[in-house]
Image (cartoon, rainbow, N blue to C red):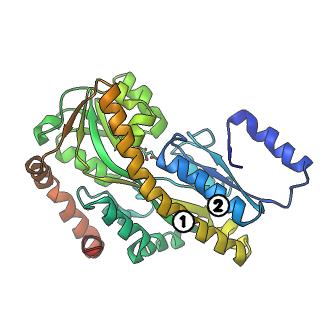
Amino acid sequence: LIAVFSHDSMEALQEDDEQKGLSDQIVIKFSHVVAENTPKGLAAEKFAELIAKRTDGKIKVEIFPNEIMYSDEQELAALKRGDVQMIAPSYSKMTEVIPEWQVLDLPFLFRSEEHVETVYTGEIGQRLLSKLEDENMKGLALWGNGFKQMTSSSGTLIQPEDFAGQRFRIMPSDTIAKQFELLGGIPKAASFNDVYIALEGNEFDGQENTISNIYSKGFYRLQKNMTLSNHGYLGYSVLMNKEFWNSLDPELQIHIEKAMNDTTKWMLSESKEMNETQLRRMRENSKLGIHELSPDERKEWQKVFQPLYQSYTERYGDEWIEDIRKAGK
Ligand code: LMR
């Protein structure tokens, strides 16, 4: 059984468990910011299901979606305090803590879903996650949502010039901010669950996100145009509080690692399918104008983005870029 909570049910459930004498059960509170019907929402549920089954209920994963427990800005501090045991923020949001991870935000770095999977689940993924050791967190996996698309309510976004003067909501990431600045746009970071209201209130003209986030949060209802640009990839670092991890028996740690690997594989194919289905739904049932970026148009964007690669290399060297590019060939 998987539990997905609302605020009100939280306390009641704790009391319930105590009454049933389940106090020796280990509870992992897993807080995230997206809707349940998304790659991350479903992966969290899958992980909870696998863990419950494989540990005979010894470990219970309680899931708190939609920022009901912690917002984007609060969740990392809550994890470090140990108030929550698991979170899965986008790696873009972690770049303040681990600046080298900005490599993952470089536009057009990933060639395909298969390329992403090779990087995330292989040796490079392990090396990226090991950067968390210094930050006193256990990195369990990199999860994928999908490629990001551009949307706007103030005109099409096809030529780089189209972005001029438009205000874009971004995740807090220097690379993403610079990406929009290079296009002549005006980026500003905002918490994920504030995006709908901000778009509705005309605080932003547009934003970038995956199909499943654009669909599940209803952004498409407020935007006039979407360009299928696949320019960047939205992925997550699945994090656990280090002290909590260290407190677990090795046998349980192995269960967690195995369940996490199986979940990651499952979600990478599930997210691809989900993004495809939801794109079809938007095509059929919404007024959103959808443009697919042509190879020539993509080249124009790539030219504009070139300085991002230069500045990354100047600061952090070209090792990560080269390793990722070579992967899966
Ligand atoms: C966003 O803020 O746009 C995304 O990181 C939300 C998410 O977690 O998918």
Badge 1 residue CB within 8 Å of ligand 1 = no
Q: Quadrant of residue 94?
A: bottom left
Amino acid at pointer 1:
Asp
The residue carrying mark 1 is 262
**Residue 229 at x, y = what percent?**
22, 46
Assess disc 1: are there few (<14), some (14-19) or many (≥20) residues with their C-alpha within 10 Å of its C-alpha. Answer: some
**Residue 193 at x, y = what percent?**
48, 36
The answer to whether the residues at label 1 and label 2 have Cβ atoms under 8 Å apart is: yes
**Residue 177 at x, y = what percent?**
29, 47
User: CA separation, marks 1 and 2?
Assistant: 9 Å
The residue carrying mark 2 is 50
Q: Is residue 301 above or below residue 290?
A: below
Please indicate whether residue 195 sits to the left or right of residue 322 in the image: right
Please indicate whether residue 245 sits to the left or right of residue 163 in the image: right
The structure residue drawn at horizontal position 81% and vertical position 45%, both measured from the top left corner, is 14
Q: Is residue 179 visible?
A: yes
Q: Is residue 184 above or below residue 80?
A: above
Q: Earlier in the sequence, mark 1 or mark 2?
A: 2
Q: Which mark is residue 24?
A: none
The structure residue drawn at horizontal position 10% and vertical position 53%, both measured from the top left corner, is 299
Amino acid at pointer 2:
Leu
